[in-house]
Each structure stands twice: as structure tokens, then as C-alpha cells.
Image: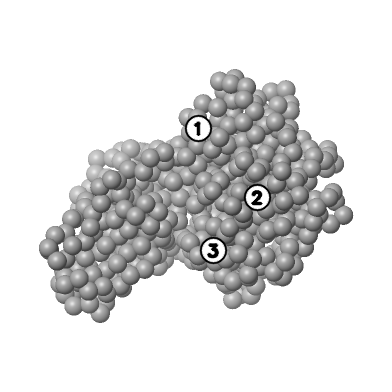
Amino acid sequence: MKKTILCFIFCTVYLVALPQGMGWDLPESWNLNLAEHPEIFHLPPLDTQLILQQDSINDLDKSMPWRYGIEMQLDLNMWRDGLWTTLPNGAKIWRATIHSADAMNLSVNFSDFYLPPGSKLQLYNQERTDVTQTFDHDQNRINGQLGTWFVEGDIIWIEYYQPPGTPNTARLQINSVIHGYRMGRVNAIIGEGKGFNDAGACNYDVNCPVGSDFDGKKDLVKKAVALLNLGNGYLCSAALVNNTKNDKTPFLLTANHCLQNSNPALWVIRFNWVSPVPVCGTGEESGNLQTNFTISGAELRANNAKSDFALVELLDRIPESWDVAFAGWDNSDTAPIFEVGIHHPKGDIMKICRDDSGAQKVDANGTQVWLVGGGTHGSGNGWEIGTTESGSSGSPLFDENGRIIGQLYAGQSACNGLENNNDYDIYGRFGVSWNTGTTSQTRLLEWLDPINFGSATVETLQNLLNTPDFEITGDLKIYPNPAKTTITVMNNRYPHLSFQFFNVVGQRIHSGSLSNTMNTINVTNLAEGVYFLHLMDEDSNDSMTKKIIINK
């Protein structure tokens, strides 16, 4: 594999052309000094005390999705509202700005969405520190609906760009905004506002060791687990699942109860939200990783309350550059020797739990489940490592072989300080979901075994079977160059990207992590001249160097 190496002694520097990451162009207005700005749409304030009172009850119930935001109705149309700007070359920009006081984050739902070829849409916050993926013609849906991931802050900008000569056929109609009051920075008004690092103290980050008999499997299957934004202010967990064709059809498995009052067309799925600095049941704060591996939109394929499962198919294929996986499964309904759950409790960074007692088959008021015994239910003493919480709903349960055997339905397991409360959890059984029901809309069989292979098991499939050279797959954008005060690195590919910043004589000036989607390097105090930004993917040890000009 080709490597690019810094060699200041021989004054040899390899400068690599970085292709733009898929969907990561900057908003066009950021490079323009536009004099006019759109009028801000102000949403009405929320009754935060009532919200907290409701959450104090709902957060205890794993049989319902976890609420992080309130959906607020809005009627905003691009041809009636916002601001159009025509550029000298004939291109056009439409912008709209929405404000919801004291929101930690905001996202929008489009009831009518159509973009002509060549145009694009992006959403970002007031500070321009958080920007969504770039939406284009490929995200047009037959039903015209689309949901977006949220951006931080209480002001969200919606920007549409139309190149010269593009017909005026775009349609953008926003019918609701999700005011996120959790899953962000602590909000002084709500007081005990929750979100990142808010799961119980006894939780284990997914990168914590859970046993040599599973750690190797975990490093693969965790790549299938996702945080599921239901488009209505609620969250669940889910997992990509493989099928017998091994063709990377983007099937996503979650809980049937996550369908309650939600529309899969508005779902947004986030992968690879994993702490680079894991905390293992000690109550400390996990290190954050602000990735934006998100995909919008899904279509329901099958669901059944008998085992509380829902299977959807994502409307977009998984990009080839994403380091995710399609989890294997076992439909034999054989009791596991031990089992592991991987999930996103309370919308937090990915966690893991393990039970060594072996789950049991039980009937939970008509729902066929695996019982992780604890408390007064079944044998065992709950999870030996970690726990699940509200928001873990729909998360996968893996057997000792790393195959999915169920998804979280309900339970009473929780943290009691740094300890698990030793209570129970229940998961809908994959083996029951497989062929219970009389049609393909009520079972998994036809979707996950489309070739009638008949096998009881399928193994996990990696999306990246081989890692090409770093410089070829580098979904990175570095700007501005020349720079004056800061350099921004947009990273949509490498969860463990690090950097070293050198002057021309080889002295290291800065170093650190670039694992977030948007990363800033401060160069305010540097003198004018030539510098070198050395990047390394710590997973593969591939590296590259970029020449940076500082021009005051």
C-alpha cells in the first residue's frame, strides 16, 4: 500500500489532491458576501416544565421511543417565503432562517421536496460550525417527503443553490421543525437538560472490553448499529442486517413500537457514533466524536407485534466509502450461551452490555421474547456488564457468535449509581420474527432470504472489504488555503484521523485529533509562510501531507 511520508531532510513533500467527500461541499453563500439576509421565522416558546414532567415518567419506559425534541408545525414554502438572491453568473440561492428559542438543536421535515439535477440543499447553524450532508437530486422521493438530521443551536439556516441555466422546478415545503431540548449542550433554562454523556453511570462505551471471547466480534458488529431519529422528536436504536444474497441491500432492523406515530420516510439514521476515549462503567464523561454518517429516508418492509420487530429498507444505498457493516443473524431460535447488546441509550454515544447467564424464551403478554433474567423475572442477575435504557429500544441482541437473535422490546434494567440494578430486559426474538405471519409484510423470511437459501445463519458483511489507498478514498476537505486565522478540516470518512502541523524546518507546532466531521486548527499566532499538515488514519496507519500557506 502506497504511503506518503514526511521527509524534511531531503525537502521532499508529496502533495495529494483530496477529492471532496460525498455530499460535503460547502454552502455557496459561505464564499460570498451577500448583503441581504432572510427574515427570521420565530417559533413559539415551549412549556419546558410540562415537558420535564412528562419525561420524568416516559424515560422509565423502554417500550416506547425516547423523546429528545418537540415537533412544531410550520408552513414555509421556498416560492413564498425566505429570500432569493440571483448571482452575477445567473445562479440563484434561496435561504430561510428559523429560530426556536433555547433549542439545543434543530431539524426540519419537508412535506414536499424536489431538487432539479445540479442543484443542492444544505442546512447549517448560525455559527457555521455544524452543517448537514448535502442533499441533491438523488434524494428526491416518490412521496416528496424528507427528514433531516439536526444541527446544534437554536437557529437553523436552510440554503438551496441552483446553478445557471437550471429550470425553476425545485419544490421545498417545510411542514414541521423539531425543537431539540436534549442531545446537546446543557441548557440552563431546562436546568437538567440531557443528551451526550447523559446515559447512566454504569454504562460501558462500546469500545470497552467485554471479554476476549467477544471483543473481536464486537469490533465488527458495532459498525452495524445505528442511532435512529424517527423524525418526530423521538429516538430508537437499530442495526443494518445482511441477507442471503450478501448484496448490501440496506435493511435496517428495529422495534415495532418505534413505528408508533412515526413515518419511516422522515427517519434519519446515524452510524459510527463511537467514543474515541471509552469510559467503562466509571461514570466519567466519554470522549465525543461528531461524525455525520447519516442517511435520510426509509420504507417499511415488514413488522409484527408478535415479536416486536420492524424491518425497513433505506431509500439510499450505503456509500461505498463508509466503514459500516451488515450484521449477521441466527433464525434458529436457539438459546444463546451468553448474549451482548449494543445500543444508544438516551440518545447517547454507543454503549454495550453483556449477560453471561444465557437468555430464556418467554411469552411477555403475547410478545415472544428473550428474557435477560433479573430481579423477580427468570434466572440470572441482570446484565453482568452495563445496562440498557430508554432510547435503546430496537437495539440488536447478539449471541456468543456475534449474530443478531433479537431487538430490545422492554425491561427494567437500569443504573443504580455505578452499578447495574440487576433487573431484567426483554428482546423480541429474531427466530419468531423470521416466519411468524402469513405474508411478507409480517415476517423477515422473504426479505432476508430472497434467494430461498434456507440457511439458519448468515454472517456479518463488511461494507469495506478492502481498504484502498488513503489518498484515493480520503473524504476530506481542507480550507481555506491560504489561511489567516484558522484551518478547517471536514472529515466524513475517518473516525480516528490525527494530525501534526509542522513548519518548513520540521518543527512540530500543533498536533491532535481530527475525528469530528468539522475540525478547526488555530493558526492565528503563526507567521506568514509555508507549513505542512500531516494527516494519519490511525486505523490503517496510512498518511498524507498537505502544504498550507499562511498569508496574513
* Residue assigned mark 1: 249
Q: Earlier in the sequence, mark 3 or mark 1?
A: 1
Q: Is residue 414 above or below residue 444?
A: below
Q: Position of residue 437 (x, y in %)?
A: 73, 26
Q: Position of residue 304 (x, y in %)?
A: 72, 34
* Residue assigned mark 2: 341
Residue farthest to the front, as pictured? 212
Determine if residue 226 is in view.
Answer: no
Q: Quadrant of the C terminus?
A: bottom left
Q: Quadrant of the N terminus?
A: top left
Q: Is residue 305 above or below residue 343?
A: above
Within 10 Å of disc 3 (Cα), the crowding (few <14, some 14-19, many 20+) is: many
Q: Nearer the viewer, residue 521 or 416?
A: 416
Q: Is residue 232 left or right of residue 141?
A: right
Q: Earlier in the sequence, mark 1 or mark 2?
A: 1
Determine if residue 307 is in view.
Answer: yes
Q: Are marks 1 and 2 in contact (CB under 8 Å)?
A: no
Q: Residue at x 65, y 34 (%)?
A: 330
